Image (cartoon, helix red, strand yellow):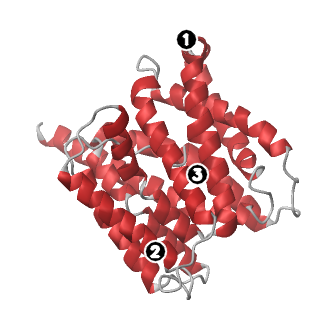
Amino acid sequence: SAAGPGAAAASSSWAARAMAGAAVVLWAASYIWSKTLLGWLDPLAAPIARYAISTAVLLAIALPRGGALAAWRAHWRSYLLLGGIGITGFQVLIFVALEDTSPVSASVIMALTPALTMAGAAIFLGEPFGRRAAIGMAIAIAGALFAVLGESPAGIAGFTLNRGEPLALLAACCMAFYTVASRRLMPRDVPALTNTALVIAMGTLFLLPLGLAGDGPRSAPNLQVLVALGGISLGSTVLGYLFWNRALNTLGVSEPNLLYNFIPVLTMAMASLQGHLPRTEQIVGALLVIAGVTLSATHPKALPSALPHA
């Protein structure tokens, strides 16, 4: 009957929306979990703890499907570049940034990634960048500045800014580069899961020597650290990717990307549950970022957002 396929399609769409929402929640939590990991490991070793687990799990899923070794031999240069910048560069910068800034400020700055991606696509790929996108990007940048400068009681009027915020912005630029470069470099004849597993594996290899240069564990891991490690490696990275990819395949790009824009608000809510209530400036700034990025995302040539924690 006609009702049967229609009901099945509707159920599949709602399941995909739930998966997109779950991925966004996991990515919002990753800023909280990353800050927790920094109480155990230094910012060079913490990404290895995260990706050693997620790489093993993703490869265990991808390798039995076949074709991974052939894909590596054919496209290793692309995987090295994307993994080196999109994983290694991004992770080191965001963990170092979180030593000096709050999870809320980091999430607000990272929310600029879609707008930065559109700007990069306009510069390097010749994609159109219309007035709506430019206005949205300006609103988003103003909101991010308002939020990060308002984190401190002396902020805005006293203009407080530490090294964490510029490093978080560089991390966002790394992810924007990854998204733009993927348009040209990510193999189209290789399954998405295999591509992601190989990119993350290459990023993890680059992280290893950096981690060995670190100071090692700062303390014995307690239950809170173990939960954060499991959450960020298995939740934010593995489940986040699997859920998001399923949502994109079912719903397309636009609807999941709108949910993605709300990561800063979710991070604020999670930080509040830990007793770190956001300041008014942070709330207003985050809402401006969401409004600006959403305005830019309605551009007809808007790129899909990268997997921010892949």
38 on left or right of 255: right
Distance in Å between CA atoms under marks 2 and 1: 44 Å
Callout in the foreground (2, 1): 2
* Amino acid bearing label 1: Ala
Q: Which mark is residue 215?
A: none
Instruction: Indicate which disc, 1 or 3, sits on the residue closer to the N terminus.
Output: 1
In terms of depth relative to the viewer, which is nearer, 196 or 141? Answer: 141
Residue identified by numbered label 2: 147
Q: Quadrant of residue 208?
A: top right
Q: Amino acid at mark 3?
A: Gly
Q: Position of residue 226 (x, y in %)?
A: 75, 59
Q: Position of residue 71 (x, y in %)?
A: 55, 15
The residue tagged 1 is: 74
Mark 1 burial class by Cα count in 10 Å: few <14, some 14-19, many 20+: few
Answer with mark 2 or mark 1, whichever residue precedes in sequence. Answer: 1
Which image quadrant: the N terminus?
A: top left
Give the SS element for disc 2: helix
Q: Nearer the viewer, residue 283 or 172?
A: 172
Task: Residue lying at the far left in this picture: please name it.
Answer: 2
Q: Residues within 10 Å of mark 2 (few under 14, many from 20)?
A: many
- Residue 265 at least partly seen: no
Q: Amino acid at mark 2?
A: Ala
Label 1, label 3: how many angstroms apart (C-alpha)? Answer: 30 Å
Q: Residue at x 52, y 56 (%)?
A: 169
From the image, tell me which residue sits under label 3. Answer: 235
